[in-house]
Amino acid sequence: MTEQHRKRTLPGRFVIAVTVGGVIGLGILRGPGEIAEVVTDTTLYLALWLFAGLFVLLSTAVSVELVGMTPRSGGFYALIRRAYGPYSGFVIGWADWLTYATDLAIKAVVIMEFVAILLPASAAYTSALAITATTVFAVVQLRGVELSALIQETATSLIGLFIFSLAMLLFFVSSADNVATTPATANSSLNDWSLLIATIIFTYDGWLYASYFSGEIRGGTGAVARSCIKGMVIVIALYMLLNLALVKSVGLAALAGSDLALARALELAVHPAAGAVVVVAAIVILLSHLNLEYMTGPRVLQALAEDGLAARHAQDVGKGGNPVFAVIFTWAVSAVLIVLGGFEFLLLFSVFLFVPLYLALIIGVLILRKLEPDTRRPVRAWGHPYSTVFCLVAWTIITLFQAYVERETALYAVAMVALSWPVYRFLERRAESS
């Protein structure tokens, strides 16, 4: 079953669900603590969150032009291939899929680590329980896309309600440990700022999650693109509300360095045992991410297969609407990674790819404006060309800075691209001979 015959079974509200539910994750639970270590001035801290949110919103408003132009599922692969051609699309597609397979393994393990906080006896069975968790959500995908979509919509509603309720609670309580903070010192190193930037990007990452389902959402690509923007507005509002509440209730000094800043805030402002609520919320959020990533990752593999760049069976869609072989293969790789462990490099590598990938999207808008000026664009980049150029310069600076600080990871990325060429040529020749 090819992309052209895919049924548009997902409702428009699903775009909001995957955008809000996909972006809000572990980043906002622990990010404030990491950022508060570097930025100790309250005004600067809040300004950083607001500026980052507005910048991501602007980047979304620019890159959704590609979403509107691309009526097929597959996420960044489908968008990048249109702008750059098959080889660049192949590199991005396989790298994107690998990050999903890796992230599924990592999040399954992290879920079990959180479970162990509540149930210490389970720590002895982390790997087995992690495989069980990832298997359950793989099976959910085999049952059908409508069930997994319903799970995502429900989870997103719960996540949004939790963030809003927590913010309201913290607004009306305060801690004796809420002390005045001082401006950030000059002692922060480049590595500190690199970690801060990576944390912000990770916390806001996922603003184009809906592009992985563009060929399956009712209302067409224009509705998908506009809903991406609406979803990010909701995320920014929730993030700012929560950060204002954190600053008011406990202050930055109390949060600095905390692995779960929200749990720390509840423990200080409400009750020492209240942090367990955040641990439970973290488990629910990560479980919803397993569901979403089993929906998105296999669709990258499916899109590659449709273009002859992956195993042919990966494009086959089951009766429920999900690519069965692609789901099973993604599950198998994630399970192997859980068993092997030691995949910290893959985590760093996947995070490192976020930044140049976003840069490639912005450049793609400029390329297609030149190559396909007459192509129908249901949604145009807001403020183009000024907004596009601004995003291009900003993402270029961020990319170069991260590549300089994380030079070893950047070299691995270059090596991966170099090694991908013979693989691509093999798959291309196979497609031509079939």
Image (cartoon, grey):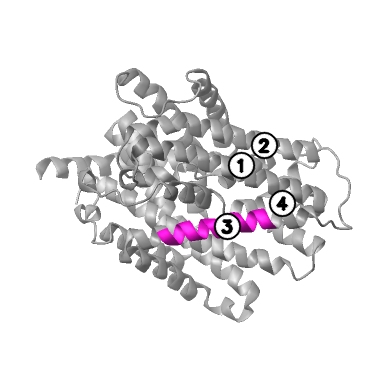
Farthest left residue in view: 433
Q: Pointer 3 and pointer 4: residues touching (CB < 8 Å)?
A: no
**What range of the chain is rendered magenta?**
150-165
Measured from the top left, where is residue 94 in percent x and y?
35, 46
Question: Considering only order in the chain, which callout, 1 or 4, is on the residue closer to the N terminus?
Answer: 4
Is 192 left, or right, of 233 in this rendering?
A: right
Q: Which residue is mark 4?
A: 33
Secondary structure type for disc 3:
helix
- Front position in the image: 122 or 47: 47
> Looking at numbered disc 4 in the image, what kind of residue is underneath it?
Gly
Residue shown at 86% from the left, 44% from the top: 181
Q: Which residue is mark 2?
A: 50
Secondary structure type for disc 1:
helix
> Looking at numbered disc 1 in the image, what kind of residue is underneath it?
Ile
Q: Pointer 2 and pointer 1: residues touching (CB < 8 Å)?
A: yes
Residue 418 seen in the current view: no
